[in-house]
Amino acid sequence: MEKTAKRDFKVGDEIYVVDYWGAAAFEAYAQIIQVNHEKQNFLAVLYGDTYKTYCFKDYGRLIFDTKQKAIQAAYLLPKPTSFVWQIIGNRVYKKTVLNISSRYINGATDLVIELNKGKEVSIKEIDVTIFKNEQQARKIVNSKTD
């Protein structure tokens, strides 16, 4: 079942997004300048001169109505030099976060976590295959093998 947007996006809407600078995530003010309902995405301008495309489905994950919610979402992302635990198959691996950066995935902006070993991983994987807590990761693995 296709997930639908939880809000209607319109040209001129002022929003807040989770972006990155250097190696860490933070909130940023943006204004929607173009909406494509067919593709379920929009183009927004950040900082007055940076254009990024966002997917409607990322409302509540990368896109927010308030600055406070965007700050809170950015704060919850892993920080550079912190540890995360990644599930690969039925094993849990401890990895160091090197960086948070941005990639275009399927035509829209997404944030990725660059790890010291392995490939970068979308922040969509947090609490799915990437965990800030080793016990949570092991609990998921153990529930798969039961």
Image (cartoon, rainbow, N blue to C red):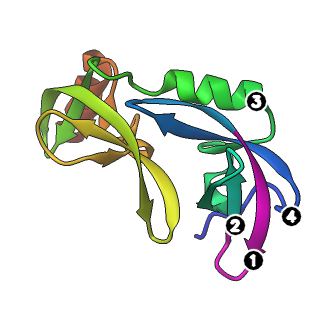
> Looking at the image, which residue sits at the far bottom?
38
Would you say the residues marked 2 and 3 are in contact, meaning their CB atoms lie under 8 Å apart? no
Residue type at mark 4: give it: Lys
Q: Indicate which disc, 1 or 2, sits on the residue closer to the N terminus.
A: 1
Mark 1, residue position? 37
Task: Tell me if mark 3 has few (under 14), some (14-19) or many (20+) residues whose alpha carbon lies within 10 angstroms of its own.
Answer: some
Q: Is mark 3 on a helix, strand or loop?
A: helix
Image quarter where the C terminus lies is: top left
Mark 3, residue position? 67
Would you say the residues marked 4 and 3 are in contact, meaning their CB atoms lie under 8 Å apart? no
Task: Tell me if mark 2 has few (under 14), some (14-19) or many (20+) residues whose alpha carbon lies within 10 angstroms of its own.
Answer: many
Would you say the residues marked 1 and 2 are in contact, meaning their CB atoms lie under 8 Å apart? no
Q: Indicate which disc, 4 or 1, sits on the residue closer to the N terminus.
A: 4
Instruction: Tell whether position 36 is magenta.
Output: yes
- Give the residues drawn in magenta, as a range: 29-42
Q: Indicate which disc, 4 or 3, sits on the residue closer to the N terminus.
A: 4
Closer-to-camera residue (27/136): 27
Is 4 left, or right, of 111 in this rendering?
A: right
Mark 2, residue position? 42
Mark 4, residue position? 10
The CA span between labels 4 and 2 is 9 Å
Is 109 left, or right, of 61 in this rendering?
A: left
The CA span between labels 4 and 1 is 10 Å
Q: Indicate which disc, 4 or 2, sits on the residue closer to the N terminus.
A: 4
Q: Indicate which disc, 1 or 3, sits on the residue closer to the N terminus.
A: 1
> At 84% from the left edge and 61% from the top edge, which residue is drawn?
8
Residue 145 x, y percent position in the rendering? 17, 38
> At 67% from the left edge and 32% from the top edge, which residue is drawn?
70
